[in-house]
Amino acid sequence: MFQFWGDGSQAAKDLVDAIMVRSTENFNWTFIFILAVVFYVYWSEYQKKDFKVIWAGFALYGVHWLYEICNAIIAHVWGYPLWSVSNESTTFILLIGVCWELSMMFSLAGIISYKMLPADPKARYFAKDGRKGVSAKLVGAISMALLFALVESFLAGTSNHSFIWVYKWWGVLPVFVTTYIPFFLAANYVPDWEPKRRNRFLLGIWGAVAVLLVVLIPAGVI
């Protein structure tokens, strides 16, 4: 049921070679429904003026897109990405490593993570008898990262190959450490940064994503 590492098999490589990026062959109406749900969530937070929650969503989602672009570049340069999704598991593949459903989930993941933090964003666990304790934001980020890594492990083991890992050295542990921890650190910490620093981060990362997409998609790189 769970797969913890890529197997380097020809079968996995064949699945990646068959991926149809931005093909509408499997397109269906769930695409529109999911988009409506995401729009509703963000608009609801905007109406409540809970801007920190929105920034959390944008922070994680921006990091997510930067990672997906890097993964697609790796596929272009070395032949195979670190992770990919199969044609059978989705209605639409945006880049070789991310489908519509997965990307929309990540657009909400930062909101979910930030909302799960204690009411006091500066709360610390185990702060007792002069000990500073551990930041609730850090604990939250690591916990969410672990959960998502385990879910990805399950997806990698599904019969329709929802997730495909080709390289033998890539799996749950590197996903957890190098991918999901940075995702959720961004979601939990960026909203409470000083405004100028927060805005520089969000504008910088989304500006980079926009430029890379505009340049690399027409060039056929991703």
Image (cartoon, rainbow, N blue to C red):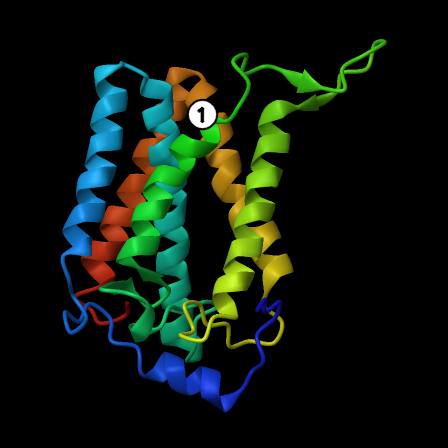
Q: Residue at x 58, y 27 (%)?
A: 137
Q: Residue at x 53, y 23 (%)?
A: 117
Specify the quadrant that holds the C terminus: bottom left
Q: Residue at x 40, y 73 (%)?
A: 75
Res. 93 image quadrant: bottom left
Q: Between 117 and 186, which is closer to the camera in this rendering?
A: 117
Q: Which residue is mark 1?
A: 115
Q: Is residue 72 left or right of residue 183?
A: left
Q: Is residue 110 above or below residue 73?
A: above
**Picture coordinates of residue 122, whole percent (x, y):** 58, 14
Residue 201 visible? The answer is: no
Q: Residue at x 35, y 54 (%)?
A: 102
User: Is disc 1 surrounded by few (<14), some (14 to 19) or many (20+) residues within 10 Å?
Assistant: some
User: Looking at the picture, which amino acid does disc 1 mark?
Assistant: Lys
Specify the quadrant that holds the N terminus: bottom right
Q: Furthest-bottom residue in view? A: 10
Q: Furthest-right residue in view? A: 129
Q: Is residue 68 above or below residue 62?
A: below
Q: Furthest-top residue in view? A: 129
**Picture coordinates of residue 164, whole percent (x, y):** 46, 72
**Picture coordinates of residue 121, whole percent (x, y):** 54, 16
